[in-house]
Image (cartoon, rainbow, N blue to C red):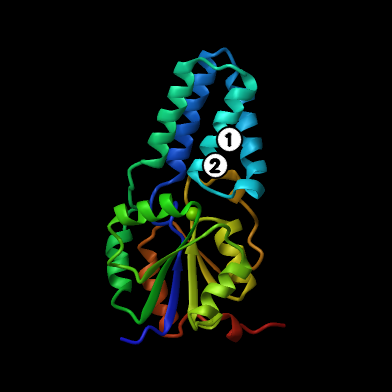
Amino acid sequence: MDENFLLLLDADDTLWESALYFQRAEKDFLKVMESLGFSSAIVRDTVHRRDLERLSVTGYGAGPYMDTLVSILEEFMPEPPEWSMRALADIRTCLLGHPVVLIPGVNSTLETVGRMPVHTVVYTMGEEDHQSDKFRRSGLTHLVNELTIVSVKDSQVLAELMYGKGFVPERTILMGNSPRSDINPATELGIRTIFLKRNLTWSAEHEDFRNPELVTEIDDFSDLADIMDQFISGDIPSYSSIPTN
Ligand SMILES: [Mg+2]
């Protein structure tokens, strides 16, 4: 079957749970710090601030996040007791090896989409090892065409990916849970998007939609199949055919 359409799928918190495990790591870290005598509120504020600051330096990922927690521990307590360093190493192990739990409906929906003339790419950012390991453990490898891991998601990276594969915005759909990393860079290129609303989304990823006319909001991953079907049959207009006044 000719794959005339391109579907780009974010992975973390779109295909499988992710923020949940970062939140657990943070809770464990706050417990360690509380035991060492530090206020949870102050430590939490520091974690959130450093988390934003590190992005431009280290990029996204579980490893850099854990490095941030270790540096905060050492800053609050220059000679931390051995048990606390071991506890942080264990928190790292849990975060990097967290179970891959699929979002409801992912498997059956990707099976349905797999029967459509669609080239499906899992488009994710973060560390190569961690992201490809989760992809392998997700059991989704046979349901999509490929995995692309980038260090940062922006419209330039997205344009290179889409045009590099021979597709155009009029035949591309991107689905993700982050307005900042997924939706806005895509709509800037005129790509139609599906925003999967999730309860837990990292605060740095919140942003207003810049082109809301190109965004379809859904709560249920399974809605992807109908939307793709309508897009392919032309019932959902592509950007170029939306009348502009
Ligand atoms: Mg995501």
* Res. 146 image quadrant: bottom left
Left or right: residue 141 versus residue 89 is left
Q: Residue at x 33, y 72 (%)?
A: 113
Looking at the picture, tell me which residue is in the foreground, 96 or 201: 96
Type of amino acid under label 1: Thr
* Residue 88, image x, y percentages: 47, 27
What residue do we see at 36% from left, 41% from top? 97
Which element type, helix, strand or loop, lies under badge 1?
Answer: helix
Q: Residue at x 43, y 46 (%)?
A: 18
Image location (x, y in percent) of residue 240: 60, 85
Residue identifier under label 1 = 68
Front residue of this view, candidates 45 and 78: 78
Look at 62% across and 68% down and name the residue there: 155
User: Is the residue indicated by label 1 positioned so its CB lies within 8 Å of ligand 1?
Assistant: no
Q: Is residue 244 above or below residue 51?
A: below
Task: From the top left corner, tell me how far across and down residue 114 is, in percent.
Answer: 30, 73
- Measured as percent of width and height from the top left, residue 231 is found at 44, 79
* Residues at circles 2 and 1 in contact by the CB criterion of under 8 Å: yes
* Quadrant, the N terminus: bottom left
In the drawing, what numbered circle is on residue 64?
2
Three-letter amino acid code at the position of disc 2? Pro
Q: Secondary structure at mark 2?
A: helix
Q: Nearer the viewer, residue 127 or 100?
A: 127
Q: Which mark is residue 243?
A: none
Estimate the spatial distance between the alpha carbons at disc 2 and disc 1, rounded to whole Å. 6 Å
Look at the picture and state if 207 lies above or below 236.
above
